[in-house]
Image (spheres, coloured by chain):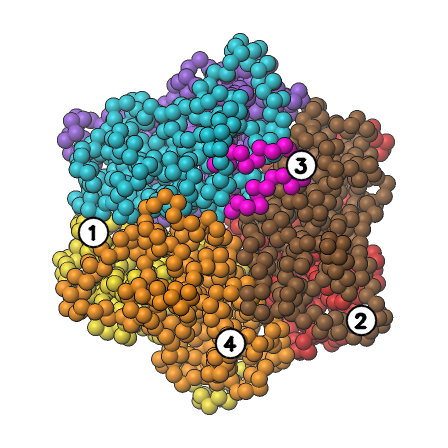
Chain colours: A purple, B cyan, C orange, D yellow, E brown, F red
Amino acid sequence: MIQRFDKLQTELPPPSDPDPVGASIVQELMGGKFGEMSTFMNYTIQSFNFRSRQKARPFYDLIASIAGEEFGHIELVATAINTMLTGAADTEAGQAGKLEAVRTTLNPQQFLAGGAATLVQDSNGKPWNGDYVFSSGDLIEDLTHNFFLETGARNNKLKVYESVDHPAARALTGYLLVRGGVHQVAYARALERLTGADLMKLFPTPRIPTDSIPECQPHIKKGLHRTLFRFSPEDFMEVKAVFNGPHPETGEDLVVADEPMPEGAPAFDLPAQEAVFAPGPAPEEIAEIAAKLRDKAGLGKEPHGVVAQDGSGGVMSKVKESLS
Amino acid sequence: MIQRFDKLQTELPPPSDPDPVGASIVQELMGGKFGEMSTFMNYTIQSFNFRSRQKARPFYDLIASIAGEEFGHIELVATAINTMLTGAADTEAGQAGKLEAVRTTLNPQQFLAGGAATLVQDSNGKPWNGDYVFSSGDLIEDLTHNFFLETGARNNKLKVYESVDHPAARALTGYLLVRGGVHQVAYARALERLTGADLMKLFPTPRIPTDSIPECQPHIKKGLHRTLFRFSPEDFMEVKAVFNGPHPETGEDLVVADEPMPEGAPAFDLPAQEAVFAPGPAPEEIAEIAAKLRDKAGLGKEPHGVVAQDGSGGVMSKVKESLS
Amino acid sequence: MIQRFDKLQTELPPPSDPDPVGASIVQELMGGKFGEMSTFMNYTIQSFNFRSRQKARPFYDLIASIAGEEFGHIELVATAINTMLTGAADTEAGQAGKLEAVRTTLNPQQFLAGGAATLVQDSNGKPWNGDYVFSSGDLIEDLTHNFFLETGARNNKLKVYESVDHPAARALTGYLLVRGGVHQVAYARALERLTGADLMKLFPTPRIPTDSIPECQPHIKKGLHRTLFRFSPEDFMEVKAVFNGPHPETGEDLVVADEPMPEGAPAFDLPAQEAVFAPGPAPEEIAEIAAKLRDKAGLGKEPHGVVAQDGSGGVMSKVKESLS
Amino acid sequence: MIQRFDKLQTELPPPSDPDPVGASIVQELMGGKFGEMSTFMNYTIQSFNFRSRQKARPFYDLIASIAGEEFGHIELVATAINTMLTGAADTEAGQAGKLEAVRTTLNPQQFLAGGAATLVQDSNGKPWNGDYVFSSGDLIEDLTHNFFLETGARNNKLKVYESVDHPAARALTGYLLVRGGVHQVAYARALERLTGADLMKLFPTPRIPTDSIPECQPHIKKGLHRTLFRFSPEDFMEVKAVFNGPHPETGEDLVVADEPMPEGAPAFDLPAQEAVFAPGPAPEEIAEIAAKLRDKAGLGKEPHGVVAQDGSGGVMSKVKESLS
Amino acid sequence: MIQRFDKLQTELPPPSDPDPVGASIVQELMGGKFGEMSTFMNYTIQSFNFRSRQKARPFYDLIASIAGEEFGHIELVATAINTMLTGAADTEAGQAGKLEAVRTTLNPQQFLAGGAATLVQDSNGKPWNGDYVFSSGDLIEDLTHNFFLETGARNNKLKVYESVDHPAARALTGYLLVRGGVHQVAYARALERLTGADLMKLFPTPRIPTDSIPECQPHIKKGLHRTLFRFSPEDFMEVKAVFNGPHPETGEDLVVADEPMPEGAPAFDLPAQEAVFAPGPAPEEIAEIAAKLRDKAGLGKEPHGVVAQDGSGGVMSKVKESLS
Amino acid sequence: MIQRFDKLQTELPPPSDPDPVGASIVQELMGGKFGEMSTFMNYTIQSFNFRSRQKARPFYDLIASIAGEEFGHIELVATAINTMLTGAADTEAGQAGKLEAVRTTLNPQQFLAGGAATLVQDSNGKPWNGDYVFSSGDLIEDLTHNFFLETGARNNKLKVYESVDHPAARALTGYLLVRGGVHQVAYARALERLTGADLMKLFPTPRIPTDSIPECQPHIKKGLHRTLFRFSPEDFMEVKAVFNGPHPETGEDLVVADEPMPEGAPAFDLPAQEAVFAPGPAPEEIAEIAAKLRDKAGLGKEPHGVVAQDGSGGVMSKVKESLS
């Protein structure tokens, strides 16, 4: 079971200039073979399928807790894509030929199937599929896979960073590179524990140190490059039996955080995009109904959720101001 | 973000006689178009993509919290499949022709790709894919979809119940029918709130009342057919602005639980299946290494996780005794 | 545009003993690369995409009219599959483990996704897809494809005939072999007209004459092996500019029928299958509502459609009688 | 069985300026999950698979006759795409680098696989597949699906209307929105008849009234927003037992037309596109052969089919004149 | 470029009792994610795409030459499957219901699409696809992938060995395990050379030594577990700069053979299977034509190719004798 | 078995101005339904699956030897794509937003999944799949397929030639058109031999003679339009029993070459592309390690492979010079 926290793992910049082409490319980090759907579902299914979990508990705990973090990663990728698409479809609904972004993007379905929003597809518009999940049950083999998967994921994050200059994409990849690096180390270390092979010399792979990416620095300063979270209030305590020893690049100690997860940041209240009917061609109708329902349920006048900005659509205008 | 709890949403029976064919069929509830991967990922992605969430908060909270529950459903389906496959591959590893189950099952990849375990595929062996996710951003349309999705899911659960007589499959479908029914009602009620249309007369659909399924009764007695959980310690409080009023079949009040989630039950420590190398062809090696690592990390001699049974493999023998 | 006639192109035997495995195999003729969905959609799309149709009208008319016949072929394949599945799911709905056919068939989704009915899949459970349609626009090339497609289709029909002994499958393939043969000849003749190449010596391909299949004889006796229908009340008159000359195997003249299409036969009123909720777990409820609606609309007490048998479910019992 | 009429359901504008990007986007209405292939094949297969059709005849007739109309819709979508691509490949064949449209379109296969023509793919170039067909056999559930399918289809039509300014796309979506709306109402009404639930308040969904789309007006004026055709000369008479009562938006009576289908309009004689060899790199050769064959068959000198324009290529020049 | 040698890499047993179910399972080694199509095409494409090949020549030569061997592996897998299917379809062609094997196999398309022969599919009947090829261009990453791919391939070979008792399957997996082991070592060694990480302790993975598989022993005795072939008459000489040092399991020296490739064994002249029209329903016709053509071309009376047995169909009878 | 020769079948121009869009389109010739993966794998698998090969040896030899040539064709297509992408990613690695080509190409995965290199996909980014292989075992039918496949392949080559003006694409298609034409003739001739049908009048199809393509002329001058190679040192001698008689377009004699294969040309040493980490973000590190390994293995200082240019990166600069 899980419990959700209505927060992002890290802060991302608010919507600014829309970038549909960039958002098409960032899809690789969502639905690509090495995207976050793959890391999330691989570790999740491996944890469900784990046999002999008591006797091999440190390894089970490692996989299960990293799975917990990966949910937050698909959330971040979706958030970045959605902020990059915000503004691309905020014209009036029902007007012929006004939804121009569809003609110039690489992925028309972000608008036709989605509401200027994330799809579970890769950068070529191909859907993620369940056979991207590798769960052989053989612990050494699954860990070998996971190390390889994180390596491919790091490659893709670096290339997306190189390809898309939008602030949301840069912030996203800066964070994911740091956190993916931790998982890459964790799986290599687990393999070392089980086989005695010295895998630390493989780092960094690809051979671009996280140190050289400016957007990684704030997270490295907080020690996030060497810290694993359990993403559980009380479970997965044996993670620390595997995740320890020196970091392969810096030599610092790897640590398991006492707190279950990072503090995080409030999510955005993404403004409506009327041309794609999100949340409807006339969003105020829904707002009125919601207000009445809230009132009737004794919940008061103000929404209870905490978001990064107020819901009045001010984000877009403020950002645009700051850009002009 | 999420936090994981190392527990199942409900108790399932322990491994007994293996049933690979049945396990192939139950895959429909994992990776089928109307399986739990679909419900989980649809609501999760819809919650990520939700626009104007503050103004439409009761609806956002509804979708986001049901998504939280669905993670527990893929966990349950995987658990049921895995218990049904347990015992089908517990012969010695590396012996020619001893893995006989592969020849008679409908899905050889549960053994060849998996370790006698769940795949992210449907009952025809086709992988789940990301285009099963519908996330148009149009709230009324997404809710219409979700109501339809739950209807199709209920159909599939009923048919799997009819098709597979294995205790794990029966317990699984009994629980999922009750919980899926709650979600079906929730989405219909949300549509009523937004449009005024009276949808409660559509229930039950398919027209087989949950009342008539014996395996549903324990859950109905606990009121689980009319209770929604937020699956969050503090968020999604506005669910109750939508989920209220009478239950369409019983007339009882729909309620939102105060506690975030059901109490749940410990998961199984599924025994090793050596013939498929899960967790390895000689699982004791891994156990020894794990014991040393645990000790070295100051975690003591006993594993920290709580499981339904001890890890000595006693489950299988006890169950087999009870069957003979 | 089309108009439908609520009739089958030829008579098929009524439901008798169910044969789910056979029905899984017959799916190849529905959704396989060389199945009737492929012939139907290839010629349909080619006719839509045809350029310079006035100047090349005899060829356009040929393709367009054969497309019209192919609709009737997917109808026949579906009918055969459905009769073969009838009786496999007529137990009471909602009973655990009673839907036994699912465990022994090759395609569980005929029951889980369908109501003991046809899917748009092949014999391996893989869905038909739109890239099976070849529509290059180059007339000679499209005709070359069509000749090849009919050849592959004939191969598959012959093999299904060899694989499935069920009376519905035999009657189906007997008819389709004859009609597919006409189309194979038609496309070869069209190529001859355009290029001068003598293609008639390729027949029969595969090298099994239709003469040797008993189930083909009634249709051959009617001349259906050398007759093309326009499947249009007034259009496609130029078919006869291409479809003429001697039949490659018998030497008889090829003819275009004066009447638009074969007389056909009434379709079956397939009995309900309650275990798969088709048309519902308690079909009498629907019947009552329908009766009231019919009455209210001034349509009288009896259904207006003509079917092969009365709607009282007598088919099944009569057939079973005849088998015992 | 069907009979074809060599006519379009409604008039579309002739080829004008080519718009390959727009044509890539319109593909969503052909091969998308909610495109016309989906509506056509869903209702067609549901009608084949319908059980207990005599007792439930009004519902069978409804589904079967709407299926009949949908054939005309795939025909219209193909026609619109083909007119939009006309002119994009009319350079001489066999010249290096002259087929420039391929470099700027979103779907190169419209030229490489097709002859500047429609594919059975969606706007991301993914083929339509048979698992888009939902045919559970449970009447209430199939109708729920069909209502949802029409809702998604309406969403897609509106967005394509917003995305593509080409006259063919606007005329196409204007017509399809009106006719799709009729089907959406029909399925909702059928559900009302079976369950008593009041679904009319869901309209319009998405919440953009057809009234506000100029291209819908000519069709609304003819009453096409409230008229169902049987698309059969004599069958499906019981449609009117379901399709009646007030239209949810206008309150006018829903009616079933006496005539089987709309009058329609002649199709285009789309000019050759030599660069993609449609119907060949030197189309005059084919024309000569066809003329001889027609003559030899006693069909006279003029083609028998009726098309919107003469076949001399005058369409393109006339349109281009009118644009300059 | 390549040159083909009409020989198998190793001897396999001739056709004996057919085993269609086993042949369905062996498909995993052909078209599975970790099958031989994957190893063959991964290394082939990586060699085509290799950048800076002169400067990194030892690594290029390694990948390119292993690719050469893998062609022989898909040939062996196909041969094994084909021998296992031989005899399952040797009844007379065109007889209703005589092709019984189709009803009991897991993959009907081996008969319906193939001529009792190999498909490019996996054990679930899903086709191999090009996205199984990983070719990032980053040498360290590609080698990491290749090591992982060989690990997964070894897992699958072991499980197929455990699942299928047919002599052809056992001989096949015995050989492939030995040769795949060489490739696994080669890629690990290459990674060691590039990074300094000690990977040899990962062996064997899965943790079943090849020593314990009887069918591996003949090949181990010949030293095939530690020998790499260049599969080129003169190229890829720098392989030995990487492939050297001690074998991780036996400590023996790894060697590069002087001769380009193993001696090999003649292929089978697989007997006709008339019921699936391979090579035709009446194979003697083809034989007669071939004889005439051979004669006319001055090639003499006897076929020039060398096969394991004479072409008179004696194989089947001899094997059947030996089994009775 | 095969042996590889580290050479291309024909000379291609070196990298010049990068053309990512063109390279996306050329993918159709790699992974399209009618691309070289299809011709290569179809004939390869057909040769593996060939039954009764001794008696039908001339036909077996024909298919097997053409398969041998097709390997060289996938190699050529990959080479052309790779040269067209060279220069598009040669900026420094790890810089935000510098990999601009990804934003303007039709296939971002050539950079994100590949290292500015070929994928096994078509021009829409869809992976090649194993069901593109047709291998029915029925010789006449397989040959009919192969003739059709070559026809479709010729169509695609012509259209790519028309679409992409890059010198590599023109040289590639010029060569492939000539060689594909030989295969098209070969399969038609084989069908003639088996059936007596005169197929030569179908040529050329599409109706654009190779004569009219300037890039074909150098190859035609060498007689490559009428010469078949066995691609084997000693096998497949019976090819000449089928491949003989007059060429359908020129009337010249078809001949089987005495030498096994064309002389060929050295491959390129494609320069590193650092931004996509091919062969790494700092390629000199790999070069140093390779030099040491070569030295240690007694291979001397210079690489042993022969390439079209020296490995110092001079190609790019020279070409760029020549362009400025």
**Mark 4 — on which chain does it sit?**
C
Span of residues in magenta: B84-107
**Mark 3 — on which chain does it sit?**
B
Q: Depth check: D1 or C295 in front?
A: C295
- Residue at image position (84%, 71%) is E301
Instruction: Check disc 1 and report the residue beneath it.
Output: D195
Where residue F175 appears, x then y in whole percent? 69, 60
The dot on residue E184 is none
Q: Is residue E232 left or right of residue C207?
A: right
Assess disc 1: are there few (<14), some (14-19) or many (≥20) residues with their C-alpha within 10 Å of its C-alpha: some
Assess disc 2: are there few (<14), some (14-19) or many (≥20) residues with their C-alpha within 10 Å of its C-alpha: many
Instruction: Check disc 4 and report the residue beneath it.
Output: C216
* CA distance for labels 3 and 2: 48 Å
Secondary structure at numbered mark 1? helix
Q: Depth check: C263 or A123 in front?
A: C263
Residue type (three-letter) at the residue carrying disc 3: Gln
Residue C280 is covered by the magenta coloring: no
- Residue at image position (72%, 71%) is E284
* CA distance for labels 2 and 4: 38 Å
The dot on residue E294 is 2
Residue type (three-letter) at the residue carrying disc 2: Arg
Q: Could you confirm whether marks 4 and 3 are on the same chain?
A: no
